[in-house]
Image (cartoon, rainbow, N blue to C red):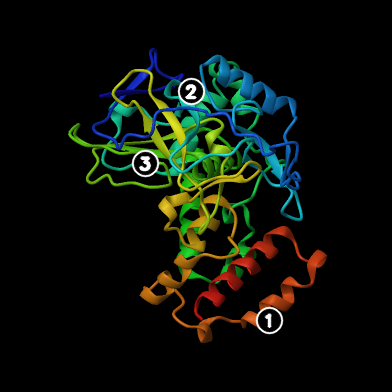
């Protein structure tokens, strides 16, 4: 069985060997039924998002449609928009029609996925996000030919000054110390060191590689491939793979715009027709989705604590049941009780209430500390 994932660093399209994959429902977009009958009309629901009308998003849609993507754009059933449910608009994917559980919302051809490693050279280890960041720069962003080919996608990616949630990799040393939690501090310091060493070795600036690494942790999906007898997609959402022999990061345009929900995700990711050359990355509804609702994945197979969500994606969820499970295990790199923190939950909440006097990074530090302290209860 074969699936294509494009990498402009190769002379031809890379083919990934994968085995049996749980088959997703065939792609179909059914027209929604009208709400009114017999001359009486139902009141229209209040809008929950504003469609993204930016030129960069329009170019991405046109590019993907030219590659036979389906279900994307205002007329396709899903579209890029900005949530109206938050104080500041958050970009994401939204349903422009209703879907039933099991429906495929949208599909992206596998040859539109950007491989961040050579599949034929992958080992049992996926490789670090820093390695993926280096390959992203070499294969695409800094590659004269590939950067033109993939411009419609690259131009939609976050920049330091736009649509970017900084991970602690971008925090100052004193801000990292204020996180307090040993496991998180260890991850941040280890990655900072790795970025600096690889940047020096490759002739890149640390800032450039650090940002590329952040793009990998926050937007790339993992595909593990075993010996050919069985394989499944580990897309940062769910995985049943055991003992994979080949692993790579891939970036999938459009699908990587879906935001996270720890408890209320409504889609997961599947590969359709993996045995064919024309395979598809898809989002499938795990519950009914009403028109206007935001489309949300559960990152990390739904088992990431606030430690991983902050270090990999740059945000702290309002609620996360995994935090309680993590703290109950009480491993050495955890803070085992509330008494071991330097401040109380009430003190941190009071600091958060200071509002504009806080820097964005310190606000994120306090949100993280509050989230974990609530999880002890």
Q: Residues within 10 Å of mark 1 (few under 14, many from 20)?
A: few
Give the structural element (helix, strand or loop) at label 2: helix
Q: Residues within 10 Å of mark 2 (few under 14, many from 20)?
A: many
Q: Nearer the viewer, residue 183 or 115?
A: 115
Say whether residue 18 is left or right of residue 325: left
Residue 27: x percent and y percent? 44, 27
Looking at the image, which residue is at 34% across and 41% down? 126
Say whether residue 341 is left or right of residue 335: right
Residue 149: x percent and y percent? 56, 16
Say whether residue 38 is left or right of residue 368: right
Q: Quadrant of residue 17?
A: top left
Question: In front of the other: label 3 or label 2?
Answer: 2
Of the image marks 2 and 1, the number of the one nearer the N terminus: 2
- Can residue 212 be seen by looking at this rendering? no
Q: Is residue 339 above or below residue 191?
A: below
Question: In front of the other: label 3 or label 1?
Answer: 1
Residue 299: x percent and y percent? 48, 50
Q: Nearer the viewer, residue 308 or 266?
A: 266
């Amino acid at each position: 069985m074969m699936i294509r994932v494009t990498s402009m660093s190769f002379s031809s399209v890379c083919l990934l060997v994968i085995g049996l994959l749980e088959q997703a429902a065939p792609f179909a977009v059914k027209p929604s039924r009208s709400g009114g009958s017999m001359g009486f009309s139902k009141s229209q629901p209040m809008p929950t998002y504003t469609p993204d009308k930016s030129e960069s998003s329009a170019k991405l849609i046109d590019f993907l449609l030219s590659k036979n993507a389906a279900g994307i754009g205002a007329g396709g059933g899903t579209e890029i928009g900005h949530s109206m449910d938050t104080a500041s608009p958050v970009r994401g994917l939204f349903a422009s029609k209703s879907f039933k559980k099991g429906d495929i919302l949208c599909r992206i051809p596998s040859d539109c996925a950007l491989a961040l490693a050579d599949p034929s050279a992958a080992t049992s280890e996926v490789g670090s996000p820093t390695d993926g960041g280096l390959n992203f720069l070499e294969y695409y962003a800094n590659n004269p030919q590939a950067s033109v080919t993939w411009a419609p996608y690259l131009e939609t990616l976050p920049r330091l000054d736009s649509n970017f949630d900084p991970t602690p990799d971008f925090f100052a040393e004193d801000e990292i110390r204020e996180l307090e939690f040993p496991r998180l501090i260890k991850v941040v310091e280890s990655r900072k060191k790795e970025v600096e060493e690889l940047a020096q070795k490759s002739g890149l600036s640390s800032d450039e590689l650090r940002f590329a690494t952040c793009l990998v942790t926050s937007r790339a999906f993992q595909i593990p491939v075993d010996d050919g007898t069985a394989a499944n997609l580990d897309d940062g959402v769910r995985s049943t793979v055991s003992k994979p022999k080949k692993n790579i990061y891939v970036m999938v345009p459009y699908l990587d715009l879906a935001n996270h929900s720890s408890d209320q995700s409504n889609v997961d990711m599947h590969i359709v027709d993996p045995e064919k050359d024309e395979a598809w990355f898809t989002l499938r509804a795990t519950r009914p989705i009403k028109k206007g609702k935001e489309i949300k994945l559960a990152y990390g197979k739904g088992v990431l604590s606030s430690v991983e969500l902050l270090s990999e994606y740059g945000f702290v969820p309002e609620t996360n049941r995994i935090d309680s499970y993590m703290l109950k295990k009480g491993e050495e790199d955890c803070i085992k009780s509330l008494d071991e923190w330097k401040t109380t939950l009430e003190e941190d909440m009071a600091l958060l209430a200071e509002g504009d006097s806080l820097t964005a990074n310190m606000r994120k530090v306090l949100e993280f500390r509050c989230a974990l302290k609530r999880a002890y209860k």
